Image: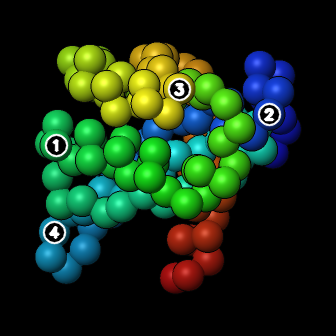
Amino acid sequence: MKKDPISKKPFEHLAFLYIALNTKEGMVYAFFAVDAFDGYAINLDVERNLSPESILKNVYFLCEHPEFSKRKKKDFTLIMEEHEELSDQIFAILEPECGKVIFNKKLNNVISNPFLEGMKKFMAGRK
């Protein structure tokens, strides 16, 4: 993946996303954070819904993830496509980790699309 010119270090800008997966038990959502610097992805959790609680829980899981703690050096920005109505709660989760949130669908897609394309190829090869 080509490095994002605005990210000068790992975990400076992260795209927050989910992938909808159809299972025998119904639809589930796998949550990820993708690093703009090098495309490194962290799988956060799998949820049965996209409730505000699920979104907030996965933002919290990012901050608590061992890889996040190991790679993050200073402040960071979480880039989300949607859920602006949760911005105050998301900021409250991120602030102790020197994080902030912005809502920018285009930037989120630029960061996450290489990861999603890789997942698509991986899943196509499993058939």
Report how far apart the C-alphas of labels 2 and 4 lie in the structure. 39 Å
Label 2 or label 4, whichever comes before in sequence order: 2
Label 3 or label 1, whichever comes before in sequence order: 1
Label 1 or label 4, whichever comes before in sequence order: 4
Label 3 is placed on what type of residue? Cys
Write down the quadrant of residue 101 in the picture. top left
Give me the disc on residue 98.
3
Of tags 1 and 4, which is closer to the observer? 1
Q: Which residue: 27% across, 47% down?
A: 57
The residue where tag 4 is placed is 26
| Quarter of the picture holding the N terminus | top right
Residue 60 visible in the displayed image: yes
Residue 70 % position (x, y): 66, 54
The residue where tag 2 is placed is 9
Label 1 is placed on what type of residue? Glu
Q: Which residue: 38% across, 52% down?
A: 61
Report how far apart the C-alphas of labels 1 and 2 lie in the structure. 30 Å
Residue 26 % position (x, y): 16, 69
Look at the numbered discs 3 and 2 and tell me whether their residues touch, using CB distance below 8 Å: no
Query: Tag 3: Cα neighbours inside 10 Å, few (<14), some, or many (≥20)?
Result: few
Look at the numbered discs 2 and 4 and tell me whether their residues touch, using CB distance below 8 Å: no
Report how far apart the C-alphas of labels 3 and 2 lie in the structure. 15 Å
The residue where tag 1 is placed is 53
Residue 17 % position (x, y): 44, 42
Give me the disc on residue 5.
none
